[in-house]
Image (spheres, rainbow, N blue to C red):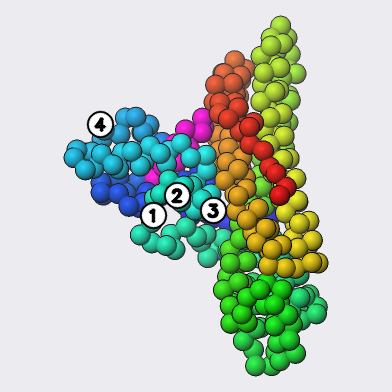
């Protein structure tokens, strides 16, 4: 089971700190965009464990912030960001480029150090073939790409230098460019490890949700309400299928990575890297939706008396099911 890490905002798929966005309204930069239960992007003014979260829809921001004059551009930017399907750092890199929003801090879109460290077990699937390519064995101790870089600069690693030259030749780069390749490789495959962790961390919540929905749909209180039972069952099935779809795609990437290392070339690496980057927005969108929906259901259970079946049905159909239809058109292509 995946280890649990206390996420900061950069480690979340549903939170976008506006402090990283170049805005003129400084008060707005102190807030975050978050995805609510209905997958709508709203501005969160404050977040407190006791009193909850204070949120404003983007169409009501003018009542709270001053967008006069040139500041009107900020409102347009926030509204564009509000409709993005995920706020994870990898999806945002792609989305912000498309929206032509350039960040002042180029390092803003990175996972926290704590999160990166927690992903090392997942990264093993991608570091082992790299280390084996250089040292002829995957038994060399390298638990992170920093360790791999240290191995390459180790004066006692002469036996690997010929393999390094071979790697550089396969990638059609100069030997001196290997560290840059490693940084790029680490970043691309860290995204897969991050998505895998987010996926794995929700397995128990998904199981509990499906069990709850199954019990509700087939409870005695649902007698005579076949249409409602079918509707909530369909919503649960949709979330389950989306979860399985992400699992299948992540497995596809692992298989394709093995294939890439078995026949490494500049073309194969570029193709693999491009395939991953082109799928980041889709994977992020589905995972963001699943996480938001399952968290909302868990929260509803913690504050609900649990006795009003009609309220549960209304919450599932009105909130949990809302927005899922927008994800049905996301297709993953093996290129």
Region of the chain picked out in magenta, as a range: 32-41
Q: Give yes or no for contact between labels 1 and 2 (Cβ–Cβ under 8 Å).
A: yes
Residue occupying the point 23% across, 42% down: 71
Q: Is residue 308 visible?
A: no
Q: Which mark is residue 96?
A: 2
Counting from the top left corner in percent of width and height, residue 153 is at 62, 86
* Residue under label 1: 102
Which of the 4 image quarters holds residue 74?
A: top left
Task: Name the outermost residue toward the top.
Answer: 224
Vertically, is 210 above or below 187? above
Residue occupying the point 67% across, 72% down: 171
Residue occupying the point 71% across, 6% down: 224
The mark that comes first in sequence, 1 or 2, is 2
The mark that comes first in sequence, 4 or 2, is 4
The mark that comes first in sequence, 3 or 2, is 3
* Residue under label 4: 63
Vertically, is 249 above or below 271? above
Which of these two is toward me, 16 or 161? 161
Q: Residue 90 carries which label?
A: 3
Q: Give yes or no for contact between labels 4 and 1 (Cβ–Cβ under 8 Å).
A: no
* Local crowd size for mark 4, using a 10 Å CA cut-off: few (<14), some (14–19), many (≥20): few
């Amino acid at each position: 089971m995946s280890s649990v890490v206390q996420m900061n905002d950069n480690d979340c798929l549903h939170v976008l700190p506006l402090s990283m966005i170049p805005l003129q309204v400084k008060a707005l930069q102190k807030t975050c965009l978050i995805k609510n239960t209905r997958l709508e992007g709203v501005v969160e003014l404050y977040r407190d464990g006791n009193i909850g979260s204070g949120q404003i829809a983007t169409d009501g921001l003018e009542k709270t912030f001053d967008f006069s004059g040139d500041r009107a551009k900020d409102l347009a930017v926030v509204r564009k960001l509000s409709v993005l399907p995920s706020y994870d750092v990898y999806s945002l890199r792609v989305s912000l480029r498309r929206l032509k929003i350039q960040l002042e801090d180029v390092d803003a879109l990175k996972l926290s150090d704590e999160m990166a460290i927690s992903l090392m077990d997942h990264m093993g699937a991608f570091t082992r073939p790299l280390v084996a390519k250089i040292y002829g064995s995957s038994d060399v101790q390298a638990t992170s790409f920093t360790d791999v870089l240290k191995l390459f600069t180790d004066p006692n690693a002469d036996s690997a230098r010929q393999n390094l030259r071979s790697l550089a030749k396969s990638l059609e780069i100069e030997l001196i460019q290997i560290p840059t390749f490693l940084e790029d490789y680490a970043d691309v495959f860290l995204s897969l490890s991050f998505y895998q962790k987010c996926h794995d961390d929700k397995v128990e919540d998904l199981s509990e949700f499906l069990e709850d929905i199954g019990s509700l749909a087939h409870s005695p209180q649902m007698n005579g309400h076949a249409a409602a039972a079918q509707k909530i069952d369909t919503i649960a099935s949709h979330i389950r299928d989306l979860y399985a779809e992400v699992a299948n795609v992540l497995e596809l990437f692992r298989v394709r990575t093995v294939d890439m290392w078995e026949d490494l070339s500049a073309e194969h690496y570029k193709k693999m890297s491009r395939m991953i980057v082109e799928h980041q927005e889709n994977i992020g969108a589905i995972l963001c939706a699943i996480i938001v929906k399952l968290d909302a259901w868990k929260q509803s259970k913690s504050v609900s008396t649990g006795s009003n079946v009609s309220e549960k049905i209304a919450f599932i159909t009105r909130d949990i099911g809302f927005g899922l239809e927008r994800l049905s058109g996301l297709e993953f292509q093996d290129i």
